[in-house]
Amino acid sequence: MLEYRAYDEIERYLNGKMASEEKAAFEALLHHDARLTEQVEEHRQLLHTMKKYGQRQQLRQQLNSIHSQMVATEPLAASPNGWKIFWGKHRQTMAVAASVSLLSVFGTLWSVQQLKAPVRQQTAHYVELRREVERLKKTQTAIINGINDASKPATPRPAAFSGTGFAISSDGYLVTSSHVVEGADSIMVENKAGLKYKVSEVYRDEIHDLSILKVTEDNFEGFGKLPYTFKVSESDLGERVFTLGYPREDIVFGEGSLSSSTGFEGDTTSYQISIPLNPGNSGGPLLDDKGNLIGVISGKQAGQEGAAFAIKSAYLLQLIDELPGAGKVDPLTLPKNNTLSTQTRPQQLKKLKEYVFVVKVYN
Amino acid sequence: MKKSLYETDEAIIEGIRRSDERALAHLYKLYFPMISHFILSNSGTDDEAKDIYQEGVIVFYEKIKDNSLELSCQIKTYLYSVCRRLWLKRLAEKGRFATKLDDSESFIPVDEETQHHEEQERQFGVMGDALAQLGEPCRSLIEDYYIRTQSMQDITAKFGYTNTDTAKNQKYKCLQRLKKIFFTTYKPEV
């Protein structure tokens, strides 16, 4: 047990107050006694820390008094208002919050717009059934080429568009939709039997979407006697109707009924018919059960099933009547006898398909 | 206030060495606005600015007193660097990430100084706690003798001991306790 006298000695030693002989004796003692050395070291550290602590406290007090003196002399020195501090503290948080809210506002607006878009598309939209051959060809040949590159046939340039047309008189006049032959350089027609004629447009009625074509080849000998006649009066609702057309390379038969006596958006010049139609059907003949021609296929309503439209034959006849008046052609001799009326549908079609042509448009 | 006396850095340092209180006061007032602005514009408050600035000044002051400062730049830059470092630490402790400090001054690396300072702070914190734990009259006795370096006679009179021996004995017991408390909590960092 160390006496407080020992402490006293240690302190005196540390403070350098020992006489030289005493100091030497103490150091000799330190040299032998490790425990004492440790004690002295600890004591030294304690006193040192305490002293420093005291100094530090004093310095702090001094600085505080300087500070309060400074604040007292210039109270407006540097104290930004509460808002500035608040802003400084929460600037980042606020920036994040603001950007999140902006993002959500515009995100919501945008997505609402996106949701609206399909709704807008549902409003009526008319589609003309002209077939863009080029595009289909491209996708198809791409597949074929992949399979067999070597057997690529050296075909002539394919038509850009195609539609359907049919004969209206035996001496070489045909009709088709005017949107089919729009912007055409040259037009070719070809029927199921493989008969090909070069034709040109002789008359066009954009309002009713009809065009009259005429075979321009010199050695043309006529189509022969047409088996159908044109109906002047309007057909009744529910009448069974059919059409022939070229929505693809081969002729396609489509059947349905007359579902409305007005067309797209109440257009009185056309019928609505329930025949499934595709691009390429445009300009095809619409016939009733008896084989009377009652209209010309023109288009359908986009996104709506079974709503196709055909121009009424009355307007076709009106157009044919106008032809001589336009001073371009002689009056047409329309067919007078209907030879289809008593026949079954396959027989009717067998005859008809001779007079239904694919109209190929080059430009 | 004779400002002209401390116009240069050297004059201020000389003043502090001479323990001239006016030198310290002048220095303190000179750079407080700069640090205050720095802290306030980096999400701090007035009180925090005062705190950090005083720490910085203490570091500087003690270095000067120790003669251990080799100042390779202006006092202004040195103070700014120390305060900046201390504030960064404070921010990290508060869990706020200062990815980018808004610096208005150039600064130098002062890791060593701040580390030493922090170690000291820790030590003094423990010492303060130990003294507080000691209770009266031990605390006053110890403080009077060791910190305020009063003589044993004065202390004997002040505390009403019969003679200096009793006072010394009392002081010895108190110191013994203080030592125990201090060294149980404080372990110097390896």
Image: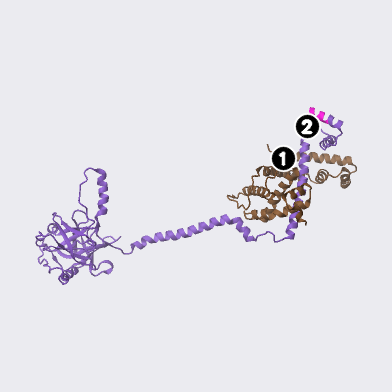
Chain colours: A purple, B brown
Q: Which mark is residue B186?
A: 1
Residue A28 within the segment the image draws in magenta: yes
Q: Residues within 10 Å of mark 2 (few under 14, many from 20)?
A: some
Of residues A117 and B167, which is closer to you in this image? A117
The answer to whether one can see residue B91 in this image is yes
For the residues marked 1 and 2, what is the alpha-carbon distance in whole angstroms? 20 Å
Residue B68 within the segment the image draws in magenta: no
Quadrant in the rendering for residue B109 = top right
In the picture of the structure, the residue carrying the numbered disc 2 is A37
Q: Which residue, as the protein is rendered here, is positioned at the far bottom?
A: A325
How far from the left and from the top, in percent, is residue B92?
62, 48
User: Quadrant of the image for the C terminus of chain B?
Assistant: top right
How far from the left and from the top, in percent, is residue A182?
23, 62
In this picture, which residue range is highlighted in magenta?
A26-38
Say which of marks 1 and 2 sits in front. Answer: 2
Going 62% across and 55% down the picture, which residue do you hit?
B41
Give amino acid for label 1: Tyr
Of residues A145 and B163, which is closer to you in this image? A145
Going 80% across and 30% down the picture, which residue do you hit?
A30
